[in-house]
Image (cartoon, rainbow, N blue to C red):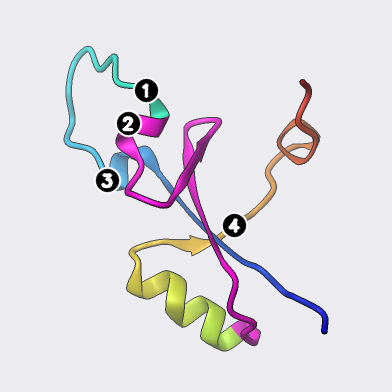
Amino acid sequence: IPLTLIYCQFVLFFITKPCLPCHSTVSAACPDFWIGYSRKCFYASKEERNWSLSLKTCSSLNASLAVIDTQKELVRNN
């Protein structure tokens, strides 16, 4: 059975209070069960959904469907 993952993202300023200067780490600023990477928080759902339901799910989390902005975001170097 193919598994489609729903990835939602939102920028840190949606989940943190403004602070100057702000020295917190991404992982500390992301909600529980979200993954912090490159100043963004990602949530991966194991539920298979169509595009419309995926958008609705992300919206309910104050998030949007993930967009890969650059080739660097697509490939993780270890």
Residue under the image location 60 percent in, 71 percent down:
46
Kind of residue sitting beneath label 3: Ile
Lateral position of residue 31 relative to residue 3, left or right: left
Q: Residues within 10 Å of mark 3 (few under 14, many from 20)?
A: few
Q: CA distance from mark 3 to mark 2?
A: 11 Å
Q: Nearer the viewer, mark 2 or mark 4?
A: 2
Dot 2 and dot 1 residues touching (CB under 8 Å)? yes
Dot 4 and dot 3 residues touching (CB under 8 Å)? no
The residue to which callout 1 is attached is: 25
Q: CA distance from mark 2 to mark 1?
A: 5 Å
The residue to which callout 2 is attached is: 28
Q: Which residues are magenta?
A: 27-51
Q: CA distance from mark 2 to mark 4?
A: 20 Å
Lateral position of residue 26 relative to residue 17, left or right: right
Q: Nearer the viewer, mark 4 or mark 1?
A: 1
Dot 4 and dot 1 residues touching (CB under 8 Å)? no
Q: Is residue 28 above or below residue 69?
A: above
Kind of residue sitting beneath label 1: Thr
Dot 2 and dot 4 residues touching (CB under 8 Å)? no
Q: Quadrant of residue 58?
A: bottom left
Kind of residue sitting beneath label 4: Ala
Lateral position of residue 17 relative to residue 66, left or right: left
The residue to which callout 4 is attached is: 66
Looking at marks 4 and 3 on the same chain, the residue that comes earlier in the sequence is marked by 3
Looking at marks 4 and 1 on the same chain, the residue that comes earlier in the sequence is marked by 1
Q: Nearer the viewer, mark 1 or mark 3?
A: 1
